Amino acid sequence: MATMNSPAPRPFSALLHAQRVWDTELPDFDPATVPPAPLPLFHAWFADAVAAGQPEPHAMTLATADADGLPDVRTLLLHGVDERGFHFASHATSAKGHQLAARPYAALGFYWPSLGRQVRVRGPVTRCTPAESHADLHARSTGALAAALTGTQSEVVESVAALHRAADAAWERAQAEPDAEAPTWTRYVVEPAEVEFFQGDARRRHIRLRYRRTEAGTATSSAAGPETGPETGGWTRELLWP
């Protein structure tokens, strides 16, 4: 509520439309120079985001579908990217865990506004081994272990006080037992079927380059580069209208 000495709050629509996008110099992106597969380009773009000082460049959105096919989305952290795909972790008993068990397919989104860049990933999801899941959890901080030991993710909690009591107890256990088990903690990997790289442009001439996995043994021409085939991991590259 505004006071006598403070200005009245601006209407939401005025506040929203006053926001600017990319009031900075953005990098160039020449899709003719990209590697034949998306992994090296993602690694390079991630390094660029870190060098540009982008806060939490490993934060990403994860989209899944529930039992009725309705979309769900949340923000979490990337745990790794390798030849298998994009790794993250959660409890198998969480909402996302149940959704992935029923419909093992997901989409990821990365946004690095300091560079005007986005990366989108779509593909099937598999669970890593229990040993990998255990190693994932215990390679992280005490706070991460405490969070994994606190309550039952996505279930209803009766009060903030109950949350604080459980969290404090979990912190104490994580400090006393740094190798404590969290049996439902699971590392997942999204095997990319499509990876799109988006480079924004102040004049809205955005560059969108999509890598799309093709059947092994085939070769497909693309607008963004030479033919691809099994020797390049079966990827084709395509430019998309922004």
Image: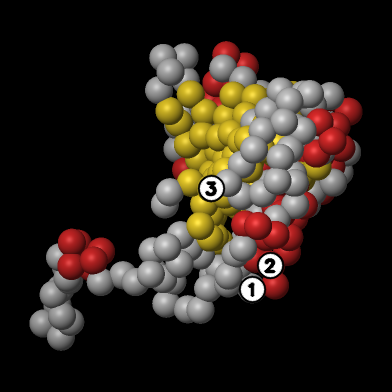
Residue occupying the point 60% across, 64% down: 29
Q: Secondary structure under badge 3?
A: strand
Task: Please name the residue that numbered disc 1 is placed on.
Answer: 52
Image quarter of residue 237: top right
Q: Position of residue 139 (x, y in %)?
A: 85, 46
| Residue picked out by circle 3 | 239
Counting every numbered tag in the picture gives: 3
Q: Quadrant where the N terminus lies?
A: bottom left
Q: CA distance from mark 2 to mark 3?
A: 22 Å
Going by the numbered disc 2, the residue's amino acid type is Asp
Q: CA distance from mark 2 to mark 1?
A: 6 Å
Give the amino acid at mark 3. Leu
Would residue 69 appear left or right of 223 to someone viewing this image?
A: left
Report the residue marked by disc 2: 48
Secondary structure found at label 1: loop
Residue visible at 41% across and 71% down? Answer: 202
